[in-house]
Image (cartoon, coloured by chain):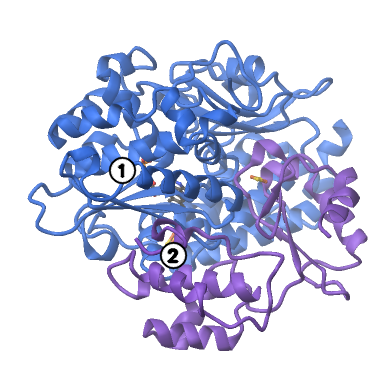
Chain colours: A purple, B blue
Amino acid sequence: MSGGMNPAIVSGQPSQRADKNPDAPLFEGEYQDRFDKILSRYPDKRAALLPVLSLAQELRGWLAPEAIARTAELLELTPAYVRSVASFYTMYQLRPVGRHLIQVCTGIGCDLCGAEDVVERLLKATKTRIGETSEDGRYTVVEVECLGGCGFATMIQVNDKVYENVKAGDVEGLLKELD
Amino acid sequence: MAYPYAHPREVRLLSKYFGDKDAVGLEGWIERGGYQTLKGALDRSPEEIIEVVKESGLRGRGGAGFPAGLKWTFMPKDGERPSYLACNADESEPGTFKDRELMRWTPHQLIEGIIISSYAIRAQHAYIYIRGEFVDVVHVLNGAVVEAYDKGYLGVNILGSGYDLDLTVHLGAGAYIAGEETGLLNSLEGRRAEPRIKPPFPAQRGAFGMPTTVNNVETLAAVPHIVQNGADWYRQWGTEKSPGTKLFSCCGHLQRPGNYEVPLDFNLKELVYDLCGGPPEGRQLLALIPGGSSVPIMTPDELDCECSYEGIEAAGSFLGSGGLIAMDDSTCMVHAIRKMVDFYAHESCGQCTNCREGTAWLAKILRRIERGDGREEDLPLLLDVGSNMVGKTICPLSDSAAVPVVSGIQKFEDEFMAHIRDGSCTAVRRA
Ligand SMILES: Cc1cc2nc3c(=O)[nH]c(=O)nc-3n(C[C@H](O)[C@H](O)[C@H](O)COP(=O)(O)O)c2cc1C
Ligand code: SF4
Ligand code: FES
């Protein structure tokens, strides 16, 4: 096996991180290696599409038309096809987002336990509206469906970190922790 | 130790090490008896393994309850075409959070289950399709997979048996419908996660056009225990039709929310009041959903039943995924049902008109009732829209969306009428 990441887990890397850089080169160096390893796990190139889009997003924070076009070219698909797949999945960002993408679960389990209050406090503290990026580019707050941790309401995901049992009163502390 | 609360009445086969940080890594897992089943299993024939699982009566834990061993027999035995196992770790049915705990506390339990199951169905590649939002869990799982490769439990000639298996962790990107097994296969192939028309079933034409078995995390995690101890051992718990234990994810208005593992003949009411501690102090239970948001809502007087597949069905609902959602008397049922329908409206893949239009209409009508702008005709209208969504679509998401509405109106009509007639909410009056 070549060095670097084990090929078994290259398609299992979260696509949203705080150290995103919208100008990062796509699929070069260690990322070229990860790209090649992704392809090695499937019988055809199309199957690499989701992991490759995730890789592009991990680098740049969102999927600009250029990233979509490059992905299409490398996987021998059309940009229109790649866009239609990317737009199907909620975690692909087709517009830039803040450095901290704050995803609050407002699914039924969290809703019953006060998720709405948490959202309200977050919007107030970040001075934004839902889906809008704060002026300093730090925060984007979005509501998401069930995050699969309903017994730990309210569940919040910030980039690749998860916060359990968040109450409205915890919001200020959480935001402080993010910087 | 269960997580986050343990209860002496649980029977913890799969959840025994929840909360035990030392059980997560390979070394700690082996100290706790991990991977002991694997060696013995690879010495037996695939048919023998399938037979034990069939005898055990283990039913799929992803929601439909299809017998696992029987499903495995649909796979070809000639080995002419490549075949696959897809582990469904997309867990996104609102109220369900058991697979997440299984993976974050006992990833090796799942991996051992995957290897043995893959061997039984003669798959040479297994994919764990894990939902994109499990960003913390996937790191734990990734670590365990690398450990298993390094130790020779995965890869070429596993433990000298001559059996080769690759395992790939494949992270989704946010789509509930990718949990439906054929939606999952499309997603794995790099397509929109749109469910396929069946037949062909995955065992005939699954991933990449090849024979594939799709099983839920909890199903696969149970396999090593059954193969190690035998079918009779597993059948000492539960009922004839629902053998064994099951994890119930319990959330909402409960004193002790969390996962509890109980034999499938456990009493549902006792699960809610005894293990979970019932609703918070000073509150009464108003409604309960026993199996994820797509099963009928139950009222407190209906809960004195067995937690088995057949027991909950006789009581008017379904076991589903075992995601139990408790609602106390501070809940506005119109709001709660609207939230659940909003979910399905958002997650409908849009292929079928009845589902796409139906979910949107239900959400719209419920929203106006919740606001106090509803009309008397809205209840029959909701039921009418709902009846057109059942049994008419490619996958059952459409049915799922109608379920909370129909059962909700049946059981909480007065709450709907209070909103419609007086524009007032019964929950506010109760608070
Ligand atoms: C809309 C929909 C969503 C589903 N979501 C999941 C899921 O998140 N996880 C899961 O294991 N099964 C889910 N299922 C069930 C799968 O289609 C399939 O039956 C299951 O993965 C088979 O595994 P099992 O037999 O081990 O339960 C879903 C089904 C439907 C119709
Ligand atoms: S029922 Fe709904 S979710 Fe299922 S295939 Fe049809 S449109 Fe898609
Ligand atoms: S409802 Fe919030 S995690 Fe499930």
Q: Position of residue B52 (x, y in %)?
A: 21, 26
In this figure, which residue is indicated by the disc labeled 2? B193
> In this rendering, is residue B372 above or below B11?
below
**Residue farthest along the front direction in this orientation:** A3
Disc number for residue B152: 1
Instruction: Check contact, mark 1 vs mark 2: CB within 8 A.
Output: no
Sort mark 2 into few (<14), some (14-19) or many (20+) by Cα contacts within 10 Å.
many
Figure quadrant of residue B57: top left
Residue B125 appears left or right of B96: left
Q: Alpha-carbon neighbours of circle 1 within 10 Å: few (<14), some, or many (≥20)?
A: few
Tally the numbered discs.
2
Residue B91 at x, y = what percent? 51, 47
Chain letter, disc 1 residue:
B
Tell me the kind of residue under disc 2: Ala
What residue appears at the point 60 percent right and 64 percent down from the top-left corner? B360
Q: Is residue B334 left or right of residue B315?
A: right
Q: In the image shown, does B264 or B305 lie closer to the viewer?
A: B264
Q: Name the one closer to the observer, B16 or B396.
A: B16
